[in-house]
């Protein structure tokens, strides 16, 4: 895919900031009780993409933190594996967008990149290898819909499951557990702050013109 094709508009933005506020159950409960106000969208996928990615970053970091606290590292592997896709799907319904998490080195086959994802991931990978700070990219298509990609960078809390195996980041019992659940796992041997993948946010052409709000389904 030629990233310079005229039908695509690529905008380089600032990197999405990770954060941690409420725990995952509280945030999901909040969205069950309160509809998302679509008027908060600005109609610009760069601005709106940053907002959505910031929110899903918070939810997932909270979920990982709570899973480790309550189930331990080994239990968190199953907990997150069992719930991550449902949470992402729920958040997509809530915001009225399509959400995905993908990588060139994915853990679950369900996170494998499609052809467009693959092109974006390779473009970001090339930029990173050139010493360029990898930041979000957005594309708008001829029909009016668009997609926003934000890099996911390695956090210290993720190294025990995604870090350098030979360096000892991933303990033997953790490695065994991961390989049992994901025999074809590729998502390891990452360094701190290295890009591990991307969030993808798909915006329909009329996403801001929707009437009413989208509720989040109960898990």
Image: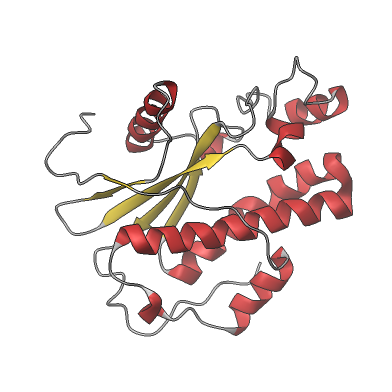
Instruction: Determine which quarter of the picture holds residue 144.
Output: bottom left
Q: Residue furthest top?
A: 166
Instruction: Determine which quarter of the picture holds residue 40.
Output: bottom left
Judged left or right of residue 208, residue 214 is right
Asked if 23 appears above or below 158 in the picture, the reply is below
Judged left or right of residue 97, residue 195 is right
Judged left or right of residue 40, residue 215 is right
- Closest to the observer, 83 or 174: 174
Instruction: Determine which quarter of the picture holds residue 159.
Output: top right
Q: Is residue 89 visible?
A: no
Q: Coloring scheme of the render? A: secondary structure
Asked if 56 appears above or below 93 in the picture, the reply is above
- Closest to the observer, 202 or 134: 134
The image quadrant where one finds the C terminus is bottom right
Q: Position of residue 211 (x, y in %)?
A: 33, 83
Q: Position of residue 139 (x, y in %)?
A: 26, 48
The image quadrant where one finds the N terminus is top left
| x 31%, y 78%: residue | 210
| x 31%, y 69%: residue | 207
Q: Position of residue 131 (x, y in %)?
A: 42, 25
- Closest to the observer, 92 or 181: 92
Q: Position of residue 218 (x, y in %)?
A: 63, 72
| x 87%, y 50%: residue | 71
| x 44%, y 81%: residue | 37
Q: Is residue 29 visible?
A: yes
């Amino acid at each position: 895919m030629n990233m310079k094709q005229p039908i695509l508009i690529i905008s380089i933005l600032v990197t999405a900031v990770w954060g941690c506020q409420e725990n995952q159950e509280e945030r999901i409960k909040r969205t069950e009780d309160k509809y998302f106000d679509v008027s908060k969208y600005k109609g610009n996928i760069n601005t709106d993409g940053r907002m959505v990615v910031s929110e899903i970053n918070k939810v997932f970091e909270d979920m990982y933190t709570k899973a480790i606290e309550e189930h331990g590292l080994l239990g968190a592997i199953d907990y997150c594996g069992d719930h991550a896709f449902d949470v992402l799907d729920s958040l997509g319904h809530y915001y009225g967008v399509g959400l995905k998490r993908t990588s060139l080195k994915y853990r679950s086959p369900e996170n494998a990149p499609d052809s467009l994802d693959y092109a974006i991931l390779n473009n970001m990978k090339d930029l990173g290898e050139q010493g360029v700070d990898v930041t979000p990219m957005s594309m708008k298509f001829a029909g009016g819909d668009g997609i926003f990609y934000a890099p996911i960078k390695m956090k210290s809390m993720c190294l025990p499951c995604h870090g350098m195996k030979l360096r000892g980041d991933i303990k033997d019992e953790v490695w065994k557990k991961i390989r049992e659940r994901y025999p074809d796992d590729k998502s390891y041997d990452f360094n701190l702050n290295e890009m591990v993948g991307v969030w993808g946010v798909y915006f329909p052409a009329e996403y801001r013109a929707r009437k009413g709000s989208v509720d989040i389904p109960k898990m």
